Amino acid sequence: MALLATDRVGKNFGGFRVLNEVSLTVNEKSFTGLVGPNGSGKTTLFNVIYGLLRPDSGAVFFRGENITGLPPFALYERGLALAFQIPRLFGSLSVLDNLFLAAPHVAGTHPAAALFCRRYWQTKERELAARAKEVLELLELTPLSLKPARELSGGQRKLLEIGRTLMASPTLILLDEPAAGVNPVLGRKIYETLKRLQREAGITFFVIEHRLEILFDFADQVYLMDAGHVVLAGTPQAVLADPAFYTIYAGESSQWRS
Ligand SMILES: Nc1ncnc2c1ncn2[C@@H]1O[C@H](COP(=O)(O)OP(=O)(O)OP(=O)(O)O)[C@@H](O)[C@H]1O
């Protein structure tokens, strides 16, 4: 069943067509990859899905609901989270505090709320602590809980960024290049963790990746974009067996641009 769907999404930047009638679906509990050469429109599509950009045409559906143009916080609360390529962490705060700050439905510390809803906040805090503990265990970051985020290695920061998305117990996580900037062994380890989350927690992943040699070992389904179009879709094996894949990666294709 389709958890996420884009229906003929179009986006122009100053007369340049960056997304052209992009229609795709991400099935529930799948590990779906989005690949394509530089500038093919992958990040723009993620930004449209995540409400960071408004499409010029078309629509985005999440669990059957039209979410086009909804802001990121509204999507996060619905179970759709995005992990940025460059982790957006608070460097001087601990790993644990970075997780706390990512939790949804935290309305802040209004004095009236603190005074009159004490029991509510105490329960809320206990729930948050339990969730953070779970997330740290899932990502094997427990020993680093109290370390300031700026002292983490590149790979650990990526895991913490993913951990921040997990605080909302999301149904779907969009990931922009989780293996970028880390060595191949760590890149694979990150993917193994994601795959475990897919299997054990039933989380759906939609992942942009340039490191195809890693992604293709983990994805169930892959979309290939070129010049703003989806040009191939299928299992990694099917995509690799299609001559169009090699033409595009040889940089010969721009015939779809309009
Ligand atoms: N805010 C913007 N204003 C103008 N043009 C933009 C903007 N964002 C992206 N573009 C252009 O849109 C095209 C698609 O960019 P996008 O970042 O979506 O591609 P991508 O497939 O994610 O590339 P990469 O793999 O290099 O990250 C590029 O030509 C880019 O220069």
Image (cartoon, rainbow, N blue to C red):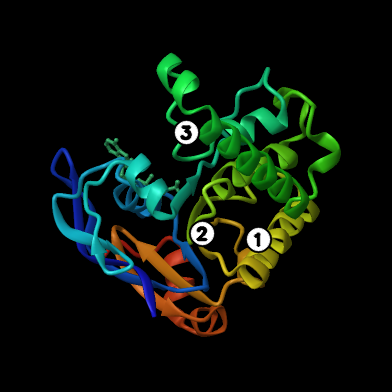
Which numbered circle lies on residue 88? none
Amino acid type, mark 3? Val
3 vs 2, front mark: 3
Q: Tag 1's secondary structure?
A: helix
Question: Is residue 47 in view?
Answer: yes
State the quadrant of the C terminus.
bottom left
The answer to whether marks 3 and 1 mark residues whose Cβ atoms lie closer than 8 Å is no
The answer to whether marks 1 and 2 mark residues whose Cβ atoms lie closer than 8 Å is yes
The residue lying at 25 percent from left, 63 percent from top is: 65
Pointer 1 residue: 194
Give the percent coordinates (x, y) of residue 219: 58, 72
State the quadrant of the N terminus.
bottom left
Viewer-nearest residue: 7 or 43: 7
Amino acid type, mark 2? Val
The residue lying at 31 percent from left, 58 percent from top is: 227
On the image, which quarter does residue 95 sit in? top right
Which numbered circle lies on residue 106? 3
Pointer 2 residue: 207
